[in-house]
Image (spheres, helix red, strand yellow):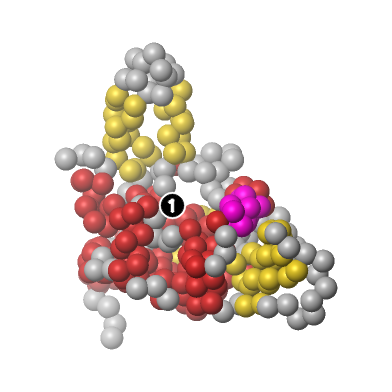
Amino acid sequence: MSLSEFLKAAESISNIKKQEVPLPIAKKYAVISPLKVGDDLALRTSLTSPVNYDREMIRLIHRHTEIQGPDGELIRENYEHFCATTSNIDKLCLIWGLYKTTYETLGKRTIRCDKESCKTEFKQEIFLDDLVKEDTFVVWEEELPFHEYIYVIEVPYDKFIYIFESKIPTIRDNNRLLSNLSVDTLQNNLQSTGMVFSRAEQMALLTKSVIIQNENKSIPNPPRTDNLQEMLIAFKQYIPHVVSEDFFKAYRDKFDKYYPQFYTIVRCPACSNEIRYQVDLEVEFFRRSIYGRGESSEEL
């Protein structure tokens, strides 16, 4: 069906304001278009469960994302390919782009001076452009694409060694884990820790496989699993807590530098102290979905 002149004009206007976004882990550039009226309804409908919300958020991001091809042409990637080759880290960059092209600002926020002798509270408008600094993005440094790269973490424990094949998770990995957890489990995680995944579930998300070897590595064909359900059970019930501590430390030492730092520097009006104001854009996006533009920006 051909579009009327009015619909053609509406379509043309909707494509004016787009935002180019770097995907530092996938090593691509994306072009993001603004949210539409129907997107808000779809997100609010999905808020019945964390699983539905996350899936709808990814579908929404995909609908508004075009990837720059080798010759500069814009390509709408197949949804499955997009989820399998885009990292959870890149997802944060896409959320920034979606916010930037739709709103430009997070609105006014109440900030408290962190200087002991001051502690003044004041309001400051936070613009999306201001959240990107020279150190915000770190580009993937390994030769292999991130979704093929494995980083081995060995953790000794008594006479055994836990060998974790760790990874940077893709969007597909995140969706797969969500699908293996009940709504009650996810809601309990949010209520008790403020996070979607528990510590054991985070380990499962970051791990491709686990091997249990004796300390001299003399046992042929040691026990190994890459089964998500088995890893979830093992991490929750059998893996010692100190092993998880060593795992997360080694993982953070290797991969933390890749997580984008969205922040701005604001100056206290009372004492001129410079304050680093950091933003969790995924949380911001969730708040906006629940409360809408006014309450999420503290402009009541």
- Please identify the quadrant where the N terminus is shown: bottom left
- Please identify the quadrant where the C terminus is shown: top left
Q: Residue at x 61, y 77 (%)?
A: 226
Q: Residue at x 24, y 56 (%)?
A: 290
Mark 1 highlights which residue? 96
Q: Residue at x 36, y 59 (%)?
A: 189
In this view, the residue farthest toward the front is 158
Q: Tell me which secondary structure the magenta stretch mostly adopts.
A: helix
* x and y percentages locating residue 112 in the rendered image: 34, 27
Q: Is residue 187 above or below residue 52?
A: above
* x and y percentages locating residue 60 in the rendered image: 36, 68
Q: Quadrant of residue 106?
A: top left
Q: Is residue 112 magenta?
A: no
Residue in the foreground of this view, choosing between 192 and 112: 192
Q: Is residue 86 visible?
A: no
Give the secondary structure at mark 1. helix
Q: Is residue 134 above or below residue 17?
A: above
Q: Quadrant of residue 188?
A: bottom left
Q: Amino acid at mark 1?
A: Trp
* Relative side of 77 to 61, left or right: right
Residue in the foreground of this view, choosing between 272 and 155: 155
In this view, the residue farthest toward the bottom is 1
Residue in the foreground of this view, choosing between 252 and 102: 252
* Relative side of 57 to 200, left or right: left
Q: Residue at x 73, y 70 (%)?
A: 213
The magenta-colored residue range is 242-252
